[in-house]
Amino acid sequence: MSLTAHQIRIVQESFTKVEPIAEKAADIFYTTLFEYDPTLRPLFKANLKDQGKKLMSTLKVAVNGLNDLDKLVPVLQGLAERHVKYGVKAKDFTPVGNALLHTLKTGLGPAFTPELREAWVTVIHIVANTMKAHSFS
Ligand code: HEM
């Protein structure tokens, strides 16, 4: 699975549009996630506002790191190791990925074109597969 330079550019560009509405985006994300899978709610012990900020800042690191996957992989591996401790399972990446796509669609509106959606799906797969391969197999 790989991304073209064009896909990397449009994903990075689209993320700059989400950043100013990061708090709202995090809110949409968790509301959607717990609708998709209410059993995930008890895994989150911390304040969701703080958690949302961390999620957005890590997504930023991931999105900006797409140009240099070799540097990004160890960051995702560390994240994966911590997620095992949070009680996350491999299957949980599906609702999380879907909630993220829904958040982007809601946040970006018509700017979330099919082309951009496809690029984000690839990014989410790369992130999830890297994390799963390291700690969830
Ligand atoms: C898609 C990639 C993901 C990213 C980028 C991400 C990002 C983060 C970040 C930055 C944190 C803060 C703590 C830390 O850095 O270790 C965190 C914590 C957490 N994440 Fe994720 N995460 C991802 C996938 C998931 C999945 C699939 C689940 C499953 C439900 C999940 C559930 C949690 C939980 C339960 C915590 C701890 C919250 C707490 O202590 O209250 N994450 N995540």
Image (cartoon, rainbow, N blue to C red):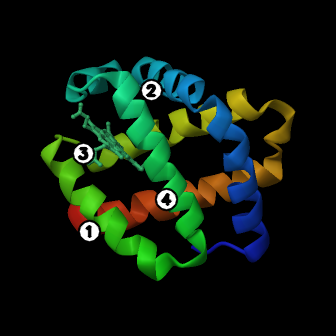
Q: Spatial distance from mark 1 to mark 2, Cα to Cα?
A: 24 Å
Residue topped by disc 3: 89
Q: Give the residue at mark 2.
A: 33
Q: Secondary structure at mark 2?
A: helix
36 or 6, nearer to the observer: 6
From what the image shows, is residue 26 above or below residue 63? Answer: above
Q: Earlier in the sequence, mark 1 or mark 3?
A: 3
- Asked if 80 appears above or below 77 in the picture, the reply is above
**The residue at label 3 has a CB less than 8 Å from ligand 1:** yes
Among the two numbered marks 3 and 4 on one chain, the one whose residue lies closer to the N terminus: 4
**Under tag 4, what secondary structure?**
helix
Nearer the observer, disc 3 or disc 4?
A: 4
Residue 17, given in percent of the width and then of the height, sits at 73, 41
Q: What residue is drawn where x is 22% and y is 29%?
A: 43
Q: Alpha carbon of mark 3 to alpha carbon of mark 4: how far?
A: 23 Å
Give the image quadrant in which the ligand numbered 1 is located.
top left
Which amino acid does the dot numbered 1 rest on?
Answer: His
